[in-house]
Image (cartoon, coloured by chain):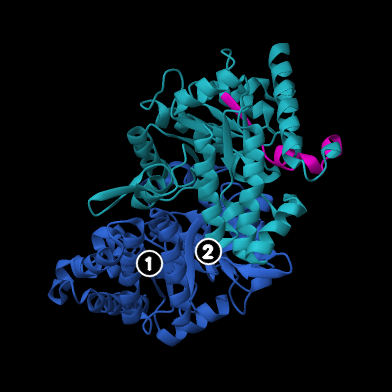
Chain colours: A blue, B cyan
Amino acid sequence: MINKLIEKIQKTQAPIVVGLDPMMKYVPSHIQKAAFAQFGETLEGAAEAIWQYNKGIVDAIYDLVPAVKPQIAMYEQFGIPGLVAFKKTVDYCKEKGLVVIGDIKRGDIGSTSEAYAVGHLGKVAVGANAFYGFDEDFVTVNPYLGSDGVKPFVKVCKEEKKGIFVLVKTSNPSSGEFQDRLVDGKPLYEIVGEKVAEWGADCMGDGYSYVGAVVGATYPEQGKLLRKVMPKAFILVPGYGAQGGKGADLVHFFNEDGLGAIINSSRGIIAAFQQEKYAKYGEEAYADASRAAVLDMKEDIASALAAR
Amino acid sequence: MINKLIEKIQKTQAPIVVGLDPMMKYVPSHIQKAAFAQFGETLEGAAEAIWQYNKGIVDAIYDLVPAVKPQIAMYEQFGIPGLVAFKKTVDYCKEKGLVVIGDIKRGDIGSTSEAYAVGHLGKVAVGANAFYGFDEDFVTVNPYLGSDGVKPFVKVCKEEKKGIFVLVKTSNPSSGEFQDRLVDGKPLYEIVGEKVAEWGADCMGDGYSYVGAVVGATYPEQGKLLRKVMPKAFILVPGYGAQGGKGADLVHFFNEDGLGAIINSSRGIIAAFQQEKYAKYGEEAYADASRAAVLDMKEDIASALAAR
């Protein structure tokens, strides 16, 4: 799957992933109205609204980008109907040829981590049969529990030729509270980064490992360091746009081959129509605004990479 | 909810939580057969089997213990049907008067953590209405992302009078890989423990905070230290029984008031009929074996506390 991701990045010339993190306040009113008319103001109505909203965006951008990253929390908040919308979104994006990164940030121990891995990346056995539960291509994984928590994911990745991105240095303001603490003179995130390189070493695609890392766009200096600590890890970079990251901050997340990183934007793309810059599209044409925002982001990153 | 948990611990005289972590290999064959006869060897069939299995155990133990802890990964592996079984289990346990600790180990940032908090503990707004998605009483939370990841849960806990248990020192063999690393001479888990005390300070029930901690039974020395670092935090202690923890190891997790900790056992109780000790019950009477295992565990912990 890491090979497929890279192939699609090269084909689209866009190291970009669109975060499908629908919040009701982003969903245009005509979509909300139609969904509530059918299902009422219920969890099912909300789930229908976010699914239709997603579908519009995916239809408008699927030819421009290699991948999408649905954030499962935004679906899980609507209970079972929300998770049904998550599954529909995953399936639809795969139908459209997109690589799907499930932003699930799971992590537990032993057989429990294996259950998450099986449910999201692999197949679960039921009697003589086996079924994919959610069937994303990649998922994000929390490393706080150590190797016991991560290795079951790596095992399933090998079997299924799928991949993970391990949280190393997250994009939020308080990420330093624990991640930046110095251990033997090194910040914890560097130690986690070293482990990512170790976990990924026997799990290689053609040029990059199935085991990648998450490093926030908001921490470019740390990205520069971590790029060297994990030379074979693809870095998923959240925090572009709405969280403050710019193209110029991101060049050091890439290797000299122009690969090695994929930049996520969520709100900046899916709710582009709510920004002054794209207001001319209006609410009805929200998906066209998203397409324009993807093209602008692609240009911003390409210019930054060309200028380095 | 922390007051209700304490009240129930005092009433049952059992600081015990039963981990409802169903794996198909624990589910007696008569239950599997009946479920597969109705739904086939499908995800729906598996979900029905684990739900019926859980129901048998809950009916057999609900009067003995204050709380249950369903591990969502074991349900999530069966996709949407599995999560429907999770929700049925949560609802049924609450009907039976049990406090439900959702072992979800979620953790993200800002609005995303808020979405998890809302989905599992609180209500989500849909138009003019608001709905509970999963509606557990407590959930477990991963602290790797720092305060940004935890505070949205604390906010919902205050609104709903519910609670969280933050992972501090987990029970698995490799938990030390990051959690034990020394920062300014202190292990990281101690620093996380100090934060738990801080997050919980303005969020107090009568004697204990709504913000608790997870500390593994397999690390009694660390438990002793963390008990002092977080005097007002209830400690959820996994790792008893199958993972190797014994009653005698656990006394230092409790405060002198005999409170402050709740010990989890999962496999040791729900799959008791598969142990030699309880084999006489046989597979059909698996729930009676679970009841016997709860009574033995209660005795083990009570003796250990009496002897300290």
* Point 38% across, 57% down: residue: A74
Amino acid type, label 1:
Gly
**Mark sitting on residue B20:** none
- Residue visible at 32% across and 71% down? A52
Give whichever of A237, A32 is nearer the camera. A32
Label 1 sits on a secondary structure element that is strand
Q: Label 2 vs label 1: CA separation?
A: 13 Å
Instruction: Say which residue label 2 marks.
Output: A139
Residue B144 on the magenta span: no
Q: Which mark is residue A19?
A: 1
* Of the pair A182 and B12, the residue shown nearer to us: B12
Query: Residue B228's spot in the image, x, y percent?
Result: 55, 21
Residue name at image x 41 percent, y 22 percent: B205
Residue B270 image-quadrant placement = top right
- Counting from the top left corner in percent of width and height, residue A212 is at 55, 65
> From which residue to which does the magenta span run?
B261-278
Q: Chain of mark 2?
A: A
